[in-house]
Amino acid sequence: MSSANLLIAHGGGPTAVINASLAGVVGEAQAQPGVRRIFGARHGIEGVLVDDLLDLTELTAAELTRLERTPSSAIGSCRYKVGETDYDRIAEVLRSRDIGYFLYNGGNDSMDTCLHMSEQMGDVRVAGIPKTIDNDLAGTDHAPGFGSAARYYAVSTAELCLEASALGIQVSVLEVMGRNAGWLAASASLARALDPRFPLLILTPERRFERERFLAAVASVWKSTRGFVVVASEGLSGPDGQVLGTSGGRESIDAFGHKMPGGVGEYLAGLLRSELGVRARAEKPGLLGRASSVLTSEVDRREALLCGRHAVSRLCSGASGFMVGLRRTSVGGYDVEPVLVDLAEVANVERTLPDEYIRDDGLDVSSSFADYCLPLIGEEPFGSYLRLPGGT
Amino acid sequence: MSSANLLIAHGGGPTAVINASLAGVVGEAQAQPGVRRIFGARHGIEGVLVDDLLDLTELTAAELTRLERTPSSAIGSCRYKVGETDYDRIAEVLRSRDIGYFLYNGGNDSMDTCLHMSEQMGDVRVAGIPKTIDNDLAGTDHAPGFGSAARYYAVSTAELCLEASALGIQVSVLEVMGRNAGWLAASASLARALDPRFPLLILTPERRFERERFLAAVASVWKSTRGFVVVASEGLSGPDGQVLGTSGGRESIDAFGHKMPGGVGEYLAGLLRSELGVRARAEKPGLLGRASSVLTSEVDRREALLCGRHAVSRLCSGASGFMVGLRRTSVGGYDVEPVLVDLAEVANVERTLPDEYIRDDGLDVSSSFADYCLPLIGEEPFGSYLRLPGGT
């Protein structure tokens, strides 16, 4: 390939740092002599299908710096499930736009699309850039987007713990995103980096909800403190495998056939009120957890940029059919290096929270989880708060 | 009074800046020759009743600076409703601790307690410090705590708008705190300071929910954009005066006999799905909106500190039975001065959002609301985001 145009598309829900990856892609592509024009698909694959592309070639360095720090997706994204018949149309658009490099930034659904693209687009070189707040992508130590969402939940949980202990009258249930993977619910445990004494219960979807065990644990903590936090994954299910709290018909189905859960927090708060007679309420920040710009992790942002840059650089040096992954390199401190992962290894694979990170009783994380997760949320998640001796 | 001790107590839910007022109280009291020891009641009036006081006299300047920036209430608070029989016990504790100055930091329930205190505590001088995220206190242009919560909702709404337009597939319903007053729901409109084109509907509890009008408005916006935000106050009620979404029995009653609403967001999202067939989901950050440290308004923090300082300074110069209020002084720019308000004028009075700030159809704020509210949320609520021409 002498030189060709490059196209990047976003798939699935935006993260706080997906634009940082985009800035990395555009910046690196501008530096590559093999790339002529740089296009971004408006609203992901849907934009490709209707040839709705934005020309990003002339973005200035100053604009790229701002793009890095812009939340959500500046070119848009979609949840469209690409069907077999769509690939011909995509190939047609790519040919007419002289696309030689195609990048897809997304999660495991998107990596499946990416794999099909690499198999069906002839000599177009194809790369995946990892992105998910859920951290359920295989082939990488963690995915860009997770560290920032984890920071959001760590800080929010700490603030909720401070608030709960100040009033000392109720259990706050925090419903956390994560359909099938408990990484984000687990990240709430990092609130303990502010105060290891915070009483927390953490319910991840890898373990079925056990009602009696849960009620006994809450009752036990309630004896010593009347203000604490229960963190629950939105995908938490009961013994029957049904997500808690969706029986009222409030669930709906997305384009990929996934259930959209909601209501776990309200369900648990209601259960605590009715069964234990304690005051309880639920918070569900939902999408705010992946959209927050002020709680973005700088580590996450740097790594998102790195993944974008590396994907373009390796495409231009001849590689194709890969997703960029992150591998930890350090022994003492924390560092990562980008690696190439076969798309077939990550497409549609869901990496849930391993057993080693879940406490045996399923009501908390294990102590080793913080070693894994704390470096990802960036420096100084908490301010230098004053905690009074004897205070709350 | 030659010299005496000072006691401060917090009432009701903490705000992001209640500790800034506390720092102001302690700092000013340390400088007043008429004050000997400075006490903070643990968990508000409940701490007073059991003589559980923290001695804050020796806090250093560095500690006060940290206290200013500590979210939640460092000495705790409570929702205890003081009964007539409690005042004798309170008087006893105040006498035994040689309290000559009593300050109560809270909202309109607390100012009622404060009024009773000033009437029943003999020669103890009594002052109220305003505090409420709801901004429903009379006698003041606005209350400390509101500006920070307003910043939280303005920024969160902007981020949600960016996220909604990037995906372009659904309506996001943001449930906002505010039982009877729509100030906070209205503050979400400040997202337009980032982009005046954001399509937003804003439902405040001052107007009864009109189902058909609401559905027609959503359907109309949906025609032009498939990603936008509906902001709804948690206290929104239907034609029958019942708060929406609480029919499922998920409401509960607090110590003051107020209903604790919840579920308005889920109710509206469900309504949009079932009646219009649009994809819709609800977010309910709840307590996170008043606990956030990273979204604290610096203006709010400064004013909270000012109110604490001013209350002590005026108590020590002989005043009693007042709440500190804030009055706007500026013509061009924004500034405030502290004033004294008679406690009888604010006790139990609820100041709702005036008609002039609500658009005639009840589905948005009026254009004058931003003039009132924007200065309160502090400088640079939004980063210098890059919005691509033709982007989302």
Image (cartoon, coloured by chain):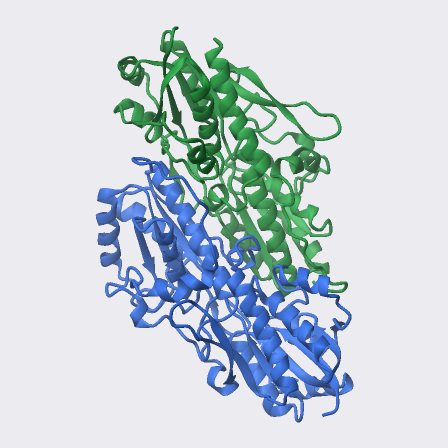
Chain colours: A green, B blue
Q: Quadrant of the rendered structure where residue A117 is?
A: top left
Q: Camera-side residue: B148 or B310?
A: B310
Relative placement, left or right, of A189 versus A88 is right
Q: Camera-side residue: A189 or A221?
A: A189
Above or below, A100 against B214 in this view is: above
Q: How many marks?
A: 0
Residue B217 visible? The answer is yes
Relative placement, left or right, of B229 versus B155 is left
What x and y, as percent, mark residue B265?
A: 39, 54
Q: Camera-side residue: A228 or B107?
A: B107
Above or below, B172 against B349 in this view is: above
The quadrant of the image that shows the N terminus of chain A is top left
Residue A181 visible? The answer is no
Q: Which residue is located at x 76 percent, y 73 percent?
A: B57
Q: Which residue is located at x 48 percent, y 82 percent?
A: B346
What x and y, as percent, mark residue B70?
A: 64, 59
Q: Camera-side residue: B113 or B7?
A: B7
Relative placement, left or right, of A2 versus B94 is left
The quadrant of the image that shows the C terminus of chain A is bottom right
What x and y, as percent, mark residue B303?
A: 54, 69
Q: Quadrant of the rendered structure where residue A172 is?
A: bottom right
What x and y, as percent, mark residue A136?
A: 54, 29
